[in-house]
Amino acid sequence: MKKLIAFLKRSVLLENPVLSLFVGITPLLACSSKLLDGVFMGLCAIVSLLISSMLFRLLRKIVPEKLRDIVFILTVAVVVALCEILLHAFLPTVYESLGMYLPLLSVSGLIFSRSKKFCEEEKFSGCVLEGLSCGIGFFAICTAFALVREFFGCGSVAGFAIIPEKYAMSLVAGPVGGFMLLGIGIALGRKLLAGKKGEEENK
Amino acid sequence: MKFNLKLPFKKLSLPRISFKKLTPEKRREILTSAITVAASLAVAALILGGAANLLGGITEKNSHSKVFRAMERAIPAEVYEKIEPEFDAAEEIRALYAAKTEGELLGYCVHTEAKGYKNPIEILVAMSPEGAVTKVEVLSVKETSGYGSRMEDEAFLSQFEGKSAELTLVRGKTDKEDKISAVSGATVSSNAVKDGVNHAIGAISQIRAAEAKKEAREAERARLAASAAELVQQNVVVPESGEEASE
């Protein structure tokens, strides 16, 4: 249990791909104006990160070093495209609301750079765990942003109206609100990171 | 007049490499790279093509049912017969349906598309058999949230109800029969919806005209048949089949 909490803390706060590494900002900003969109974007990111990390690890030995980037990019594209096809078939409403931002995940640094980093891990399980951790971090940020933006921007949570729409700030649901929230999030992330580093130095 | 075009950069020249002159190691490297890339591309294409093929049926069914659900909300009916228009309908129109219960026409549904601010907006327009709009529903909208998405509001869409002539958009409030007031701050999106409804009105009026013509023709034929039968009864004309019988 303690291990799980430590794992979650590390993935969501300390090594969050968005707040400390600034990757995957495009899909995050594009798909976090509605809670459901955010949740599904996060889930897609988790699944594609996991699968592509594993595939990278397996392909690493077969593919000559010079060609790794090409083959890895192709792998990410295939995994994300598969996600898209599955969503289109089984959850057409979600597919429509995510729109072109789901395929955009394949060119985002989130999956490619992270998975490439993880596949250098010695053990297969370590590589899977890293992928999962990174995915959960992105999922948490995406969901949190979507919750805040939908609540303040549209006055609702997951489509259920809470504040009358008259009093909602539509600016927050738009791109401006996304960037503002991103700034606040990064500042908070830095603060947490600085605190952690300070603790380690004091020890 | 002659133009003397000189390019501001040097002519691009690639170094000539003869494959035969390369060392065997280099040759092998080039070949393995080419084969690896080709193989990975082929595998990727196979996986994606296979998946798309396998799930194609489900995809089509699911994206199809969205329109049907909207039609059931607008005009509850037993069947929605697809109409194949005999005229050239506007290319924005995706499909035309006649909603029928036990053969009786309850109304028309038009699935149409119009260019919005960023993406096409899909609209379903329901119309009465008399050709007046009864309901407009926005099926998919990817406009700026907070502005363009306000056109899904009941207040804006209900303006279209009861209209049956070509509409124009105005800013501010209006109560004229052929005018629609735009959602403030979302003129482009409002215009798109208006265009979609106009296409639907145009198509349905053409269909109704065609049907009226057909009905008139049938009525004329029935009248002629009736008068012919009357003449036969009065023995003015002997029907051909009668002559054959007498022989």
Image (cartoon, coloured by chain):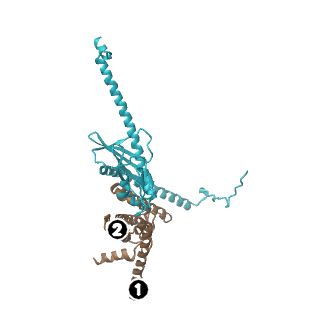
Question: Chain for mark 1?
Answer: A
Q: From what the image shows, is residue B220 above or below residue A127?
A: above
Q: Nearer the viewer, residue B169 or A64?
A: B169
Q: From what the image shows, is residue B231 above or below residue A84?
A: above
Position of residue B215 measured from the top left corner of the image (x, y, whole percent): 35, 33
- Residue A185 in which image quadrant: bottom left
- The residue that disc 2 covers is A155
Q: From what the image shows, is residue B124 above or below residue B144?
A: above
Q: Which labelled disc corresponds to residue A198?
A: 1
Q: Nearer the viewer, residue B133 or B178?
A: B178
In the picture, one chain is brown; tell me its letter.
A
Residue at 40% over, 78% down: A188
Rendered-image quadrant of the C terminus of chain B:
top left
Q: Dot 1: few (<14), some (14–19), or many (≥20) neighbours within 10 Å?
A: few
Q: Which residue in the rendered view is the most extreme toward the front? A: B175
Amino acid type, mark 2: Gly
Q: Nearer the viewer, mark 2 or mark 1?
A: 2
Question: Chain for mark 2?
Answer: A
Position of residue B39 measured from the top left corner of the image (x, y, whole percent): 46, 56
Sequence-first disc among 2 and 1: 2
Question: Can residue B3 be seen in this snapshot?
Answer: yes
In the picture, one chain is cyan; tell me its letter.
B
| Numbered-mark total | 2
- 3D distance between C-alphas at marks 2 and 1: 39 Å
What is the secondary structure assignment of the residue under circle 1? Answer: helix
